[in-house]
Image: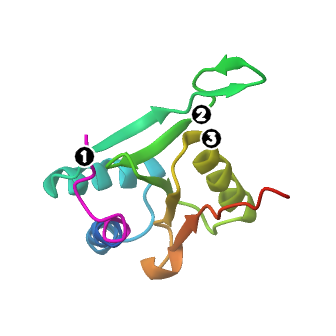
Amino acid sequence: MTAILDAQDLPHIVIRACMQVHATLGTGLTRDAYEECLAVELRSLELPFERRKPLNFVYRGQQILAATCLDFVIDQSLLVRVLASDEMTDMDRRSMETWLKLSGLKTGLIVNFQVPVLRKGIQRIALKRREKDD
């Protein structure tokens, strides 16, 4: 399947969907509740997505199955992780970078719905190209 959207537009569209969920629900719910409502928004936008997609990868020649599940993979190009916590941590950011690397995706959004202003709860993570000397 080819990407339905320009890769640069997709994060903005998904952020707007997240903002709709946050504006409707506010804070105080569980991560699962926000994830379910975001799925409703994505369906209404007719965005193709996979939810709770198993992260499979190869380690030392061995297939590792379902090491974790990815919250959303949207249009086969954007990884979205849903949080409902007091704060986003460095571990959340590092985990996203690892999941991007292992999944082959280049861009991800971490969205923490447990903040008064959602813009402050969103972080975009993009893998940088590494030099061959690294």
Name which residue type carries label 3: Leu
Q: What element carries label 1?
A: loop
Q: Where does residue 34 sit, x and y in percent of width and height?
A: 38, 55
Name the N-terminal-most of marks 2 and 1: 1
Q: Which of 85 and 52 is in front in this view?
A: 52
Q: Main secondary structure of the magenta part?
A: loop
Q: How far apart are marks 3 and 2 (CA)?
A: 11 Å
Counting the numbered discs, the total is: 3
Lateral position of residue 121 relative to residue 16, left or right: right
Q: Where does residue 31 sit, x and y in percent of width and height?
A: 47, 52
Name which residue type carries label 1: Pro
Q: For mark 2, what is the residue?
A: 68
Q: Which of 95 and 101 is in front in this view?
A: 101
Name which residue type carries label 2: Thr
Lateral position of residue 39 relative to residue 79, left or right: left
Q: Nearer the viewer, residue 129 or 13?
A: 129
Residue 7 is a magenta residue: yes
Tell me if residue 1 comes above or below residue 112 in the rendering: above
Label 3 close to label 1 by CB (< 8 Å): no
Tell me if residue 75 comes above or below residue 57 in the rendering: below
Q: For mark 1, what is the residue?
A: 48
The image quadrant where one finds the C terminus is bottom right
Q: Is mark 2 on a helix, strand or loop?
A: loop
Label 3 close to label 2 by CB (< 8 Å): no
Q: Where does residue 12 sit, x and y in percent of width and height?
A: 34, 73
Q: Which mark is nearer the camera, 3 or 2?
A: 3
Magenta stretch? 1-11
Tell me if residue 54 comes above or below residue 84 in the rendering: above
Residue 129 is a magenta residue: no
Lateral position of residue 18 relative to residue 111, left or right: left
Residue sitting farthest toward the right? 133
Q: For mark 3, what is the residue?
A: 102
